Amino acid sequence: MKTRIEIGLLYSRSGSYALIGEACRTGALAAMDEINADPAQPFTLVPVERDPGGNIDLYAPMCEDILRGSGARHVIGCVTSWSRKEVIPVLERMGGTLWYAVPYEGFEASDHVAYTHACPNQHLLPLLDWAMPAYGRRAYLVGSNYIWGWEMNRLARARVAAAGGEVLGERYLPIGDTDVARMIDEIRATRPAFIHNALIGPSSYAFMAAMRRLADEDARFAPDRCPVLSCNMTECELPAMGDDAAGLIAAGPYFRGAGGWPGRDGFGSSHEAAAHAAVHQLAGLLAGAPARASAPLADLLQAPLPAGCAIDPQTHHTTLPVLIAQVKDGAFRVLSRQAAVAGDPYLAQDRGQPRPALRVVS
Amino acid sequence: MSGRLQVPPLGGARALIVHRPHVVVQALGRQLTAIGLKVDTAWPEAGAAALSADFVFYDADMGHDGQFPWAPGAGPVPMIALIGSEAPGRIEWALRMGADAQLLKPVGDGGAYSALLIARVAFEARQRLAAEVAGLKARIDARQTVVHAVVLLMGQGRDESTAFDHLRQLAMRWRVSFEAAAERVVAQLDPQEADHGRRRSR
């Protein structure tokens, strides 16, 4: 009889960002099934699931409920940074660990969180450094009205300015709001070279639909001349946008069919892949000893680390490939691929834009 | 800051917490009440209550411009930022609102007392500097008036140095600042000022 290890699952299956929650949940459950089917593992993983339904005020109590009401010490969950920041105090108080499998804006390195998706040196900065030489340096920024949108656009503004570019406008919508008319009016008036889109959920779907209508009216706003860039769009949200997503350019550690992901391939999206990896990384850190499941993350990450552990013991961030891909015929096609890079949540290693080497002029 | 810390009287002081309903508000309110403050909460607008508060604690995570009944950075009370997200953009906003001190979220059993004292000292330093800068600015603005007054006094047959001395003596006699004396001289002697009916016969 194998030892049962309870694992918390805390994803919203309804609400503004349900598609992402579902993708992560699919990845995490698939990984649990694989581990449970592995005769070499001395334990089985049992999900203990709570669904906050997109209600921010339910994350902390539901996380506490998992940690208090079950044996689970590890919770795979949270999509928005807002919800992650809500559960961290609970994790600190109760000695739990959150496995966070979604791209985020950085500037955090909790002792109680393992970050298995990308932060800005792995998505936004390489994306802008790639896009500005290709399309120009006149940017328009949109985002959802919370920390993800604010901080991503602040970083984009700084990167564009450092490259000698210009930000023509910056607008925010409350999560769930779809009134994008003012953004579109300003884009029409200012004619940017590209748009950085840090909107989430229905706001983003409405924005992409409105951009498509604008491009139909005026070809100068078509994706080949004025692309929309995103660090949070993956395949899991393409069904919500249909043809409106055509031409969208996104950065991420994985795109379906692109290969290069450690372990198996064939995930629906990087959200699914990162949640799947989270469960496997956790299982690897338990190293066949079920009792280790109640140890703090910092203890699990003490050397020697198991082969294949990509989580940095100092930052708790993950070394990930950097891919840039564009939506074509309903799927992402890779445009650029960089070798795996360590997560640098405080951008302490960033030296700004690569500068042209000085030449000796005689 | 120099010298010893003057502990302000905190008993009965009023603290306003500008934060959405949350455990942070409870934890901070408990600390403040234990210290002896009266605690009010407000969200999203700080409202007029902020004007009569002795300390304002404000959320740096969800806070936005226009929450306070004063211009950003011009708070008339010590301001303490409640910081959850340490993203630079949020810290920048908290600073723009005029943070005199900070308290990290989640708020537990401590931190409020040191934040109150540090905020009080930083606020007083901020006020003192603002008053000093305003005084210096007023003197710089008055430079043209001083030159004007000296020129008018020279018009009465004095050389520059004598005119300057005369203006200084007038200031002493009227018991006003040099700049204020210059203003009076201009008002009395300048024919353009006379058009405004402010000229007095001597």
Image (tube, rainbow, N blue to C red):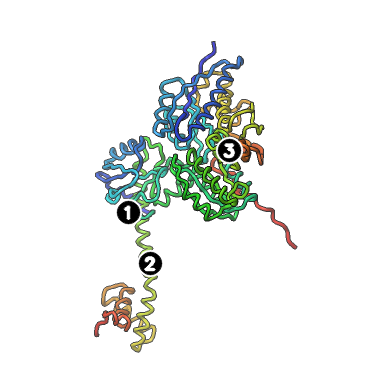
- Secondary structure at badge 1 equals loop
Q: Residues within 10 Å of mark 2 (few under 14, many from 20)?
A: few
Closer to the chain start, of discs 2 and 1, is 1
Q: Are marks 2 and 1 in contact (CB under 8 Å)?
A: no
Who's the residue at 33% across and 73% down the image?
B179
- Secondary structure at badge 3 equals loop
Marked residue chain, label 2: B
Both on one chain, marks 2 and 1? yes
Marked residue chain, label 3: A
Residue that carries the numbered disc 1 in the rendered image: B76
Tell us which disc is closer to us: 2 or 1.
Answer: 1
One can see residue A290 in this view: yes
Looking at the rendered structure, the kind of residue marked 1 is: Pro
Look at the picture and state if B153 lies above or below A11.
Answer: below
Both on one chain, marks 3 and 1? no
Q: Position of residue A201 (x, y in %)?
A: 49, 38
Q: Are marks 3 and 2 in contact (CB under 8 Å)?
A: no
Looking at the rendered structure, the kind of residue marked 2 is: Leu
Q: Position of residue A269 (x, y in %)?
A: 58, 32
Which quadrant is the C terminus of chain B positioned in? bottom left
Residue that carries the numbered disc 2 in the rendered image: B136
Look at the picture and state if A28 lies above or below B1.
Answer: above
Residue sticking out furthest to the right: A362
Q: Quadrant of residue A66?
A: top left
Residue that carries the numbered disc 3 in the rendered image: A343
One can see residue A314 in this view: no
Relative to A272, B195 lies left or right: left
What separation in Å lies between label 2 and label 1 (alpha carbons)? 21 Å
Looking at the rendered structure, the kind of residue marked 3 is: Gly
Q: Quadrant of residue A301?
A: top right
Please tell me the numbered disc located at residue B35.
none
